[in-house]
Image (cartoon, rainbow, N blue to C red):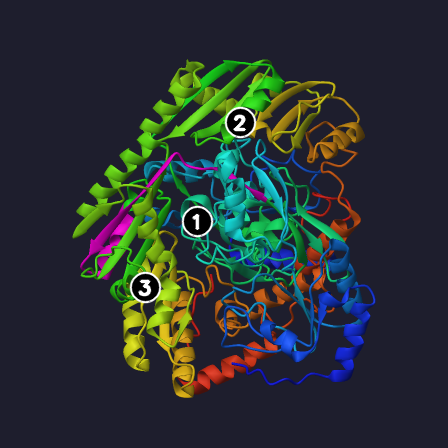
Amino acid sequence: MSLEKLQEQLREAAGRGAALCIRGSGSKDFYGNAPRGDILDTRAHAGVVDYEPTELVMTARCGTLLADIQEILGAKKQMLAFEPPHFGAGATLGGCVAAGLSGPRRASAGSVRDAMLGAKILDGRGQLLAFGGQVMKNVAGYDVSRLLAGSLGTLGVILEVSLKLLPRPPEERTLKFELPQAKALEILNRWAGQPLPVSASAWRDGELSLRLSGAASAVRAAAQKLGGQAVAQDEAARFWEGVREQSAPFFAGDAPLWRLSLPSQAPALELPGEQMLEWGGALRWLRSSAEAQTVRAAAAQAGGHATLFRAAQKSQGAFAPLSPVLARLHRDLKRAFDPAGILNPGRMYPEF
Amino acid sequence: MGSALPEIDVQRQRQVAQALRAFLPERCVLWAQEDTQPYECDGLTAYRRVPMVVALPETDEQVQRILRTCNALGVPVVPRGAGTGLSGGALPPGDGVLLSLAKFMRVLRIDPLARTAVVQPGVRNAAISDVVAPYGLYYAPDPSSQIACSIGGNVAENSGGVHCLKYGLTVHNVLRVRGYTIEGEAVDFGSEALDSAGYDLLALAIGSEGLLAVTTEVTVKLLPKPEAARVIMASFDDVEKAGDAVAAVIAAGIVPAGLEMMDKPATAAVEQFVRAGYDLDAAAILLCESDGMAAEVEDEIARMKEVLAAAGATRLAVSRDEAERLRFWSGRKAAFPAVGRISPDYYCMDGTIPKKRLGEVLIFIGAMEKKYGLRCPNVFHAGDGNLHPLILFDANDPDQLRRTEAFAAEVLEKCVEVGGTITGEHGVGVEKIDQMCVQFGAAELETFHAIKHAFDAKGLLNPGKAVPALARCAEFGRRHVNAGQLGQPGLPRF
């Protein structure tokens, strides 16, 4: 779809005060509070605008398939460092940035927001705005590009983004260890304090999987130091895909899925249900029918927050409530970008 | 550029000082000119203004009450850390309060297992790494001024350094910023977890140049010290070849821990000042560092040497030990003071460009040297495209000052034209505020003002910095076109 058409749809909706649901393939419809409003389909605004491997930067439009981007980058032995989950074959770049979800490599290589260098958006008035750029260092103006990551489309239609890339590590190896949760948490934090090329970790049901990535010599030396049991390459690839895409058995079934983001060293949480750890302990998945209040209180107590990630009903809200000051800042920022309140209203918080 | 002529409203000064003295001890409020004069400028000494009042709080509660008082009285507040900033971000308000966080110097907590430290904003950047060194940890961003600059200022400017290609900027290495809004409301941006609910206000606050909130506490991420680090010094007989070598290193799938370039005039200046052992015959040298596990560093150094040789390096030297590595770096880190010794004054630019346009921009800078009759050595964070050309001038000669400003403006606008930005890490402050009109259109600037309004509706925090008023841009545009020098209406803004 042409830019003019998107702008027209926005202006028309703003005029009527009618909610718009900004949507690519809908692979992340489950995330956040329930989408509502007329669909504004971003998929036609697609394509790579600029890719210069020696700059470690790619600029692409929102409708570009994540799968296509990964193929293009793979051909030059580069990658999106944050290893984004797709949650569907049609996943687009716009949805990836709007959701702001990062995969297994996040703890070592950074998040979607960390990779954001620039963005073009249409705000709620249909104005075309450009922030940031295609360079690694840029402190001109407020860092709106990074603010967009994880904003769930509530601040603007993300049209185009520039992302920092990384070279693909030449070597990866996965090791397995038998450990109870408390021990796994302790050892993951201790390893993270040593210069080891750990690129992902996952603990589930007494088994810790650890991925090492980097120069062959570094991976070899680290594997020797850490011990554990080596996992075959194709089995390891399937395993990390299962974690990233939530196709692993842990994620099957109907029990509500909570995502707890905590300080990595926070002790094992005493909550009913099954748990899985990632990100060196900084991400904890919980399958539990416990009361939202109970889960949120436990997360807050540990210094983090809990998101109701997947659930049949989210009447308690998908995201942890904000303090009164932050809630006011959120409302005022939302109004700055979208005065008519038409962009994905309620998707993040019911009040905007 | 301003002078230090005091134009202080004495009655207002007394009113504000008295209001602050109601809850601050005498040592925490300065208003006599001999006491306030030292605060008249930051690292950008060309801009000076004596503040009406200086407040030096010692506790969080005092910061909160100062902000509430100023907000109630409608008094502008300019926060200041160590005062090493290079864009005039801490230029004081002649009609307001300079809020110095210099007394916030405590390291509040170190958690070696979690690899975090909670520090007050006045703690020096290098002091963080020093205090956590016994745990085998360090704080990665290392701006050249790291022995003096404070973490609060780093947060305000989103400071980088020579290792940020691999380890990121301040925004990538800070977990939480605590502080107060101008209304005195306590705010937490970020948390000790890797993300927080809602918008990423931490990303917005970092690099906001003290316009959104006043920082009173920073939680930084610490990294394990690499097992080994070595640096290659590579000489080139042509600056463009050196630029191509940078691209070749990246194309080989290597992200060096540091990748810096200095041209011949810069190495000549540095070598007189610190004997770093640079190749003075080279048109440009690259410093190319590898760090990590010992075996990995050996491999990476070998690969980088191959790539640099293939790219036409005329000489390659690899640091043999830690002392030599530090010596190679000492020249780069001392580049600004070294240049300060060969010229009465220098003016440091901070544009960032896509690396592939380096040759073109350096040729442009060469042409500007001729046009304005001023010398300009170049130091360059080559890995991330951040240029620091240093224009040499004598501030006592008004014409040289004028030529310097025009020179700098042309270079920054060239950076925007080639798809880059006017400031990579030093901030806009007062210095580059007119170039913001080149970098951004009216709609983006209006959005910035709306963001500011959400945090500070009365516009009292660090007013007149970072984001130009639209009227100022209209005026700048008129001057610009009339001067007949530039006029690039088709400039890409992205």
Whether labels 3 and 1 belong to a single chain: the reply is yes
Marks 3/2 in contact by CB < 8 Å: the verdict is no
Comes first in the chain, label 3 or label 1:
1
| Mark-to-mark CA distance, 3 and 1 | 26 Å
Residue A110 to residue B37: above or below: above
Front position in the image: A76 or A107: A107
The residue stretch that appears in magenta: B220-248
Whether labels 1 and 2 belong to a single chain: the reply is no
Residue B407 to residue A308: above or below: below
What residue is disc 3 on? B273
What residue is disc 2 on? A190
* Direction from residue A196 to residue B177 in the image, left or right: right
Q: Position of residue B479 (x, y in %)?
A: 49, 84
Mark 1 lies on a secondary structure that is helix
Host chain of mark 3:
B
| Mark-to-mark CA distance, 1 and 2 | 24 Å
Host chain of mark 2:
A
Q: Amino acid at mark 3?
A: Phe
Q: Position of residue B108 (x, y in %)?
A: 65, 44
